[in-house]
Amino acid sequence: MPRAKITVAEPGTDRAPRARGSAGDEVRLLSVGAIVPRKDYATLVRALAPLKRHRWRLTIAGPTDRSRQAVRAVRAAMAEASLDNRIVLVGPVSQSRLADFYASADVFVLPSLYEGYGMALCEAMARGLAIVCTTGGAAAQTVPDAAAIKVAPGDAAGLTEALGRVLADAALRRRLANASWAAGRRLPSWRAAALRIAGVIKDVAPMELSP
């Protein structure tokens, strides 16, 4: 297909207030998405196992009824690493509760093997969260390098190293968060996405409008 015939309309991202972060010394990690094999949450749990010396807590928000196998794998990894008291699977949540999770988080983590776009990453940037993610699929392009530490998909050791850096270095978290916030301000709105799509439809199938 000739490039001139292709128009890309990225999904819109709602504007949101900047995350306030956690109040104490404990770093709050947040991941959002259904617990399915593609999200690779079990690798995230294994990556956190060597970091018990740091004060952190992870919340994973997303449906737990899509893949029993993936849920079992995550829970098994939590039990094996004795992290049941530091990782919480909250399941599907309302928009207001999800907004609360974003608001109180310090770092957004996405260990996906592949992302078609990464809307949760955009939601994290819209709130100015420091990000640790993989380079799986479009995630590598969705998040600017200045806003995230990126590792290869499935690389538990690399994820441990990246998470260890953000947990130990508050200044690094602030730098990533500032870059994330700036990137979030540049994300297209849903109105912009809709107007782009409407413009293509109008060009492809023009209609005569009544005066």
Image (cartoon, rainbow, N blue to C red):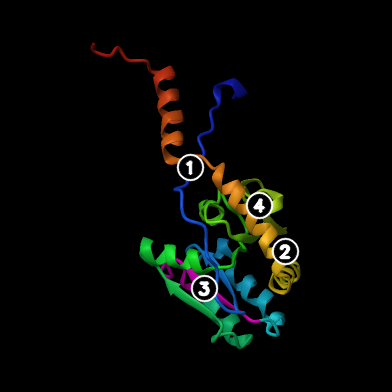
Reading the image, the residue beneath label 1 is: 11
**Vertical placement of residue 32 versus 48, above or below:** above
- Which mark is first along the chain, 3 or 4? 3
Q: Which residue is mark 4?
A: 179
Q: Quadrant of residue 170?
A: bottom right
C-alpha span from label 2 to label 4: 11 Å
Along the line of sight, the residue nearer the viewer: 9 or 152: 9
For residue 37, the mark is: none
Residue on which the image places disc 3: 59
Task: Say which label, 1 or 2, has the lower sequence index.
Answer: 1
Amino acid type, residue under disc 3 in the picture? Thr
* Distance Cα–Cα, label 1 vs label 2: 29 Å
Q: Secondary structure at mark 1?
A: loop
- Gap in Å between the C-alphas at discs 4 and 1? 20 Å
Q: Quadrant of the C terminus?
A: top left
Q: Which segment did they paint magenta?
A: 55-71
Q: Secondary structure at mark 4?
A: helix
In the image, residue 191 above or below residue 164: above
Magenta-colored stretch includes residue 89: no
Mark pair 3, 1: CA separation = 25 Å
Front tag of 4 and 1: 4
The residues bearing labels 4 and 3 have C-alpha atoms spaced at a distance of 23 Å
On residue 172, the disc is 2
